[in-house]
């Protein structure tokens, strides 16, 4: 028997070992943690270039092998800023390019002396933007979901007829778009909304539990309301409580 470990799962393991190894019960001393960090850096350098010399503390040239007093300290040393280890990476001939390589988005001040022109250097803002993009990869397939039970808001203030008191289950998920689905007491979808940026503007797509019914785009200094199917038309809605007793339009799926 064996385990199939995906790139995402391997990323999670490595992240845990580097940032909070006590969660995994491994690397239970600063020495073990820094040896792992150095080995990992050398693996990256072997495949992508660069020279990983050692692991150092910020503002020092003292390495683990130089006799840093680490014995006996708990692994929680990572929670102290001055104790956070850093790889010491130097450029060498194995890099595909001094300006474009896997290390280029780390440490804005590093390697500046190797660049011939200031414009060859990435700005801290460019580095931060790239790092945020990489960090977002871990969340791309994690679809956050919110589940709620909602009833008529008037229940907090008055007693309502039974037909107005039923509870609805509402699920909201978000990734590239935001989806909202409402399920009635029978367990059937009865309302749905998708919010996205469409045609360069905010847009809502609305259904009544089945196919899409209405599209709303924020455009032309107002809201453009478009039926989903060409055969659908807006009709006059009954003037009642659902229209706040005002003339309104009705778009039905029939």
Image (cartoon, rainbow, N blue to C red):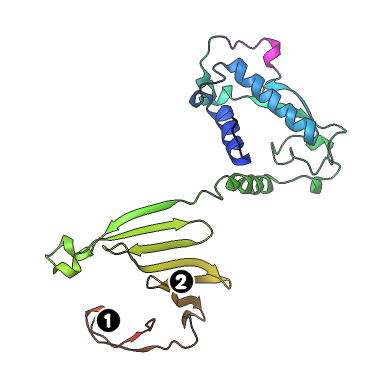
User: Residue 137 got which mark?
Assistant: none
Q: Which residue is mark 2?
A: 204
Q: Secondary structure at mark 1?
A: helix
Task: Tell whether 92 sits left or right of 216.
Answer: right
Q: Position of residue 223 (x, y in %)?
A: 46, 79
- The quadrant of the rendering that contains the C terminus is bottom left
Q: Quadrant of residue 169?
A: bottom left
Q: Position of residue 245 (x, y in %)?
A: 23, 84
Which residue is most to the front? 1
Q: Residues within 10 Å of mark 2 (few under 14, many from 20)?
A: some
Q: Quadrant of residue 61?
A: top right
Q: Residues within 10 Å of mark 1 (few under 14, many from 20)?
A: few
Q: Which residue is mark 1?
A: 243
Instruction: Report the front residue among 252 and 179.
Output: 252
Q: Position of residue 242 (x, y in %)?
A: 26, 78
Q: CA distance from mark 1 to mark 2?
A: 20 Å
Q: Is residue 163 magenta?
A: no
């Amino acid at each position: 028997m064996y385990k199939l470990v995906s790139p995402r799962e391997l990323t999670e393991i490595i992240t845990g070992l580097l940032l909070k190894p006590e969660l995994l019960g491994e690397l239970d001393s600063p020495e073990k943690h820094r040896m792992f960090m150095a080995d990992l850096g050398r693996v990256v350098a072997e495949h992508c270039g660069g020279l990983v010399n050692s692991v150092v503390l910020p503002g020092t040239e003292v390495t683990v092998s130089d006799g840093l007093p680490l014995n006996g300290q708990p692994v929680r040393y990572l929670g102290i800023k001055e104790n956070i280890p850093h790889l010491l990476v130097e450029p060498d001939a194995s890099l595909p390019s001094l300006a474009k390589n896997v290390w280029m988005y780390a440490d804005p001040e590093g390697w500046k002396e190797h660049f011939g022109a200031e414009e060859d250097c990435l700005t801290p803002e460019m580095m931060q933007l790239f790092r945020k993009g990489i960090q977002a990869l871990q969340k791309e397939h994690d679809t956050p979901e919110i589940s709620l039970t909602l009833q008529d808001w008037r229940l907090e203030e008055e007693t309502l007829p039974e037909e107005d008191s039923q509870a609805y289950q509402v699920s909201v998920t978000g990734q590239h778009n935001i989806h909202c689905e409402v399920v009635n007491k029978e367990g059937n979808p009865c309302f749905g909304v998708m919010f996205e940026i469409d045609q360069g503007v905010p847009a809502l797509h609305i259904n009544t539990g089945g196919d899409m019914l209405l599209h709303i785009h924020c455009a032309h200094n107002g809201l453009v309301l478009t039926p989903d199917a060409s055969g659908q038309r807006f009709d006059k809605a009954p003037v009642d409580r659902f229209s706040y007793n005002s003339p309104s339009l009705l778009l039905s799926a029939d």
